[in-house]
Amino acid sequence: MYCTQKEKPRAYTIFEQGRRRSRTLRTSKKAEHALATNENPIHDQSVAILFPVFLSAYSIFSRHLYVILFPLFHMFLLCCVVFIVVTLMDTSISTSSSLLNNEISAELPLENEVTETDLTPYVGMKFETEEHAYRVYNAYAGLIGFSIRRDWVNKSRMDQNTLISQKFVCFKEGFKKISNCEAKKTQITITKKISTAQAAKIELANNSGIQQKLIFEFLSRQVGGRENVGYTLKDVSNHLTSMRMTKIKEGEAYSLLDYFQSRKSENPSFFYEIQLDVEDEITNIFWADAKMIVDYVCFGDVVSFDTTYCTNKNCRPFAPFVGFNHHRQTIIFGATLLYDETVESFEWLFKTFLKAMCENKPKTIFTDQDAAMAKAISVVLLESYHRLCTWHLFQNALKNVNHAFKKSDSFASDLRRCIYDYEYEDNFLNAWKSILDKHDLRQNMWMQDLFRKKEKWASVYGRYTFSAGATSTQLSESLNGRLRGYMKSTFNVFDFFKNFERLLKDMRYKEIEAKYDMSQKKPPLSLDILLVKPA
């Protein structure tokens, strides 16, 4: 039977509907399979609801408007699918980012979460130390918007370590005094501090060779920006500089010990001793090589000791034990670096010096008018004759009785005669009374104290004690002048020892030259003497 396009047989129509229904079922099964295999839990619910709706619409439109609207519907459907996918991806990314930020925030220390109320000072507030109080006030000032500085402090007269009161003021309080300084800018005190955990990260990154700028940028990004990091790039630079300076100071101690141990291994006669404080830090140092010890055995009857030379800008006193040899040249018997100039330090030093010299005490020792040094000598070097440097005596007289020098031109000569000229004690006492009456100094406290020490500076009391013609610590002053030609104020301890060795080598080379000239050359006559010609 023949039929037209419009009049299809019923069997063909049923077959066509069955084919469409099976295609629809296959499409639905594919969609269900895609939903079942979806691994993202965020998409499951949305995909399960939206996809059947679009598939049903697709079946209806394809059934009635298959030919006309099929291309347009496919384009619309594709745009909808793309829109849904992009929306779901943005939702997933934002959710993941919020979860990640929550995890990072949970791991970071809440150092900056300090409110103004927590740090507001109040009457009766207690602090463990002065430094603790300064940090609390400085932190509070930083929250308010300014900084503070220390103004004045009151300490106990009985114990200088006991703090009575301390005043903190705004960093702009008062007026800064400018004296002999071209720079007229005052830096604002930094209130931001690097915590221990942050310092550990900075030091670890710096040790790995990372630049300071990159370290700061990396740590800033970890906390969400520079405004949240709590410090600046300058703070990072200052912290690393401070850390290096601390290591240098600690390294000086190790370099010093290594230097002494190497000298000891080269020559077992090398002697050194180091005094430690209660915190096991180096305070006082004494050393003497084999040549110094031998020189002391030969020429150690007269010793000059002076502490006026400082090794560097930190003013650590360098005190050599000095004498002179048979060529009248300056020689060194031992040297020391002192932490301070107290009685305890001097007692330790003199005992160590005697230990190095086999307990051989000098006949005479010349020093300045330092009271702590004099007390230590009276305890440790009791048998030695303690003489005061006459040059220092005149310098102190200019400071204490300057009006006498200005009032009379004869005061200096009268004082000089009392020191050097008299052979008998009675003559000396009469001359001293004459000075007091002539220049109206009987009530002067410094002159009275000087007279009580007359046995240490008047030649009349030292004529029967061997002094090798010395009257002052000029030997020490001469050595100090030579040291300044070898040293710089910026030298550390290790540089000081290295240049001190140079000085010793030059001095000992001069001694070898003098010994050679003594044996190979005729000594020059200092005076023209007419020799009697033979008749």
Image (spheres, rainbow, N blue to C red):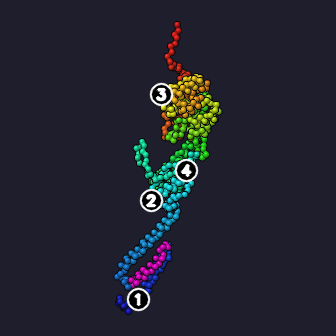
Label 4 vs 3, first from the N-terminus? 4
In the rendered structure, which amino acid carries the disc numbered 3?
Answer: Ser
Quadrant containing the N terminus is bottom left
Q: Nearer the viewer, residue 423 or 356?
A: 423
Query: Callout 1: helix, strand or loop?
Result: helix
Distance Cα–Cα, label 3 vs label 1: 148 Å
Residue receiving disc 1? 13
Residue receiving disc 4? 164
Q: Are marks 2 and 4 in contact (CB under 8 Å)?
A: no
* First to last magenta residue range: 40-63
Residue receiving disc 2? 227
Q: What x and y, as percent, mark residue 488?
A: 48, 38
Q: Residues within 10 Å of mark 2 (few under 14, many from 20)?
A: few
Distance Cα–Cα, label 3 vs label 2: 73 Å
Q: Are marks 2 and 1 in contact (CB under 8 Å)?
A: no
In the rendered structure, which amino acid carries the disc numbered 4?
Answer: Ile
Q: Is there any visible trace of residue 290 in the rendered image?
A: yes
Residue receiving disc 3? 408
Furthest residue toward bottom: 1
Query: Callout 3: helix, strand or loop?
Result: loop
Q: Nearer the viewer, mark 1 or mark 4?
A: 4
